[in-house]
Amino acid sequence: MSKRVSVSALVKKYFYEHQFPTMWCPGCGNGTVAMAMVRAVENIGLDFDKTIHVAGIGCACVAHWYTSFTALQTAHGRALPSATGIKLANPELTVLVTMGDGDCIAIGGNHLIHACRRNIDITAIVYNNFNYGMTGGQVAPTTPIGSLTATTPFGNIEPPVDICRLAEAAGATYVARGSVYYVKELIDLIEKGIRHKGFALIEALTPCPTVFGRRNKMGSPAEMWKAQRDITVSVKKIKDLPPSELEGKLPRGVLVQKERPEFTEEYSKLISRLRKEG
Amino acid sequence: MKGKKTVKLMQGNEACAEGAIAAGVRFFAGYPITPSNEIANIMALRLPEVGGKFIQMEDEIASLAAAIGASLTGVKAMDATSGPGFSLKMENLGLAYMVEVPLVLVNVQRVGPSIGMATSPAQGDVMQARYGSHGDYASIVLSPSSVQEMFDLTVRAVDLSERFRVPVILLADQVVGHMRQNVAIPPYEEIKTAYRPEPDVPPEEYHPYRGNEKGVPPFAKFGSPYHWYANSSAHNEDSFQATSDYVVARALIERLTNKIMKNKHEIIEVRGEFLDDAEIVVVAYGCTAIPAKGAVLKARDKGIRAGFFRPLVLWPAPEEEIGEIARKARAIIVVEMNMGQYFHVVREAACKGNAEVYSFARPVEVFSSHEILQKIMEVQSIV
């Protein structure tokens, strides 16, 4: 267990303080996810110069406005293919990607499938707040049935997708789900994802009180954070619980961890083979 | 002392791929599409041999996104496509203009709109190559007319993209992409292309989006001690958000345009023949320049004072050169395989001259020199 570094020390090292305050609404969980990523980087002791942050577009994708990682803000949904180019061109770099649920699963869904399939060594953190927050709370592919959003004023009739199961089916070799309510666990899940050789996806559940919560009468921010505890169940406890207590709950923790050849290593092997055959 | 050139029979797309390797391109991301496939096929074969990387991405959008990512690590990167893919790339092309990423995008034009005719040549993407992505920016677009130029202009495209930190479009077509001609290739060690300007100050004094004397900001590759943020939003000189700062955002967009337009004399490249005494000047580019030049030679044989003008760089447009022609000639005929696109550029550039500007434009069918000659004679009879 590494020594816990103070928040002020982390801010000094990883943030542009002159860019504060952040744009996130009071009660939003996104800052907690961003800080969990920074702590994971610090805990591992990654080379700061060689850690690249790639972000899509949306409320989830603004941490790089405040952090001093070298970063690329892509077009909406295109973080993963640009991250793929960065990692393949220079495999020495650690590539962290942050996306929102709409960014990653809707407009960027195709890229997610193929990043998982390729098993390229990128760590993707998907902030899931169950709706499009930045544009005023429209329905997302993750929005539960019945939820009210700006574009489902009579209740959502489309079934949502399970991000983690999609990533697993597409071939991701590390899949985890965390929540801002369990922040130490979230840091640990991100840390494990960065250390994992291959494509790692961490879904981070994060409440959106301002647009999603307000429309759906989910109570105060504090109540929404507590609800994160109630809608998830740790994978460590699943086997001890009766099916009735698991209904409607999302498993939390490491869901998939396996080994498979990593894409950029395979490409490097190809280059060496061709050079030997020369 | 210069080495001996190797003369080789090559296909246009093959010459483009070899030109890219010769120019130092070491990353290619692509997606299968006719008639540009050979470029990706050859890059898949050649790049790992020279220590470069090739990747076939999941779609056209992703392949340009990957090339952008690779370029940010300091590698010369390229992508190639045709019409339907070119449309899909407009989003990431805009990103490349905004964050100022050097790369080369090849469009081997085919008939559109939409899926159109995959194996037939066209010149319908001239305006899209200039204005296709949303917002304001200036583009560099090169137009090869031979297999030799598929090689040479690919090298030039790489060089220009690096010098100006901008995506450069090689706007080829199915004819030049698929025809075979002899190409004279100099020894690769003699082919020199620029590398983007780099910071000459320590990291703490680095302003990632402050233009140099040409308006081009110095580039620090990703993974270096220079931390910066390639920002697709409007940004200030230090790459922070300027989405509420009208003065800063306006200065950025003006610089993105001016770094090309104020340096256009370093970029523009044209060829002219018989312009000194020409009364009727034929303007053509790409595959259409081949029959157009033939028609001018035939007209000269008939005693008609015809001239030939060919922009190798379509954008920025050679407005002054066209203006000069318009002052001396009586008529200009713009021949192109579309419904009339570059005609508008020529007419605007010629507006202060004496020459009448005619459009001889049609889609799908390749021009013959005979029918262009007929057009020259028809114009001669009325001016």
Image (cartoon, coloured by chain):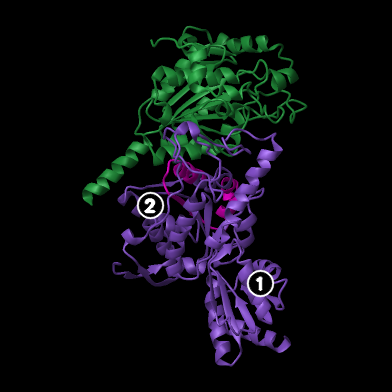
Quadrant of the rendering where the N terminus of chain A is positioned: top left
Q: Residue at x 73, y 24 (%)?
A: A148
Residue pointed to by mark 2: B44
- Look at the image and give the colour of chain A: green
Q: Assess whether residue B245 is covered by the magenta stretch.
A: no
Res A93 quadrant in image: top left
Label 1 is placed on what type of residue? Gly
Whether residue B202 is visible = yes
Q: Please indicate whether residue B228 sits to the left or right of residue A223 in the image.
A: left
Residue found at the far bottom of this picture: B302
Chain for numbered disc 1: B
Which region shows up in magenta?
B65-94
Provide residue B276's location: percent of width, then percent of height.
58, 82
Q: Residue at x 26, y 48 (%)?
A: A274
Residue pointed to by mark 1: B323
Which mark's residue is nearer the viewer, 1 or 2? Answer: 1
Res A216 quadrant in image: top right
| Mark 1 Cα shell of 10 Å, populated few (<14), some (14-19), many (≥20) | many
The residues tagged by marks 1 and 2 sit, at their Cα atoms, a distance apart of: 44 Å
Name the secondary structure under disc 1: helix
Q: Which chain is assigned purple?
A: B
Q: Please indicate whether residue A253 sits to the left or right of residue B50 in the image.
A: right
A240 w.r.t. B195: above or below: above
Provide residue B344's location: percent of width, then percent of height.
69, 67
Q: Earlier in the sequence, mark 1 or mark 2?
A: 2
Quick check: marks 1 and 2 in contact, CB under 8 Å? no
How many labels were placed on the picture? 2
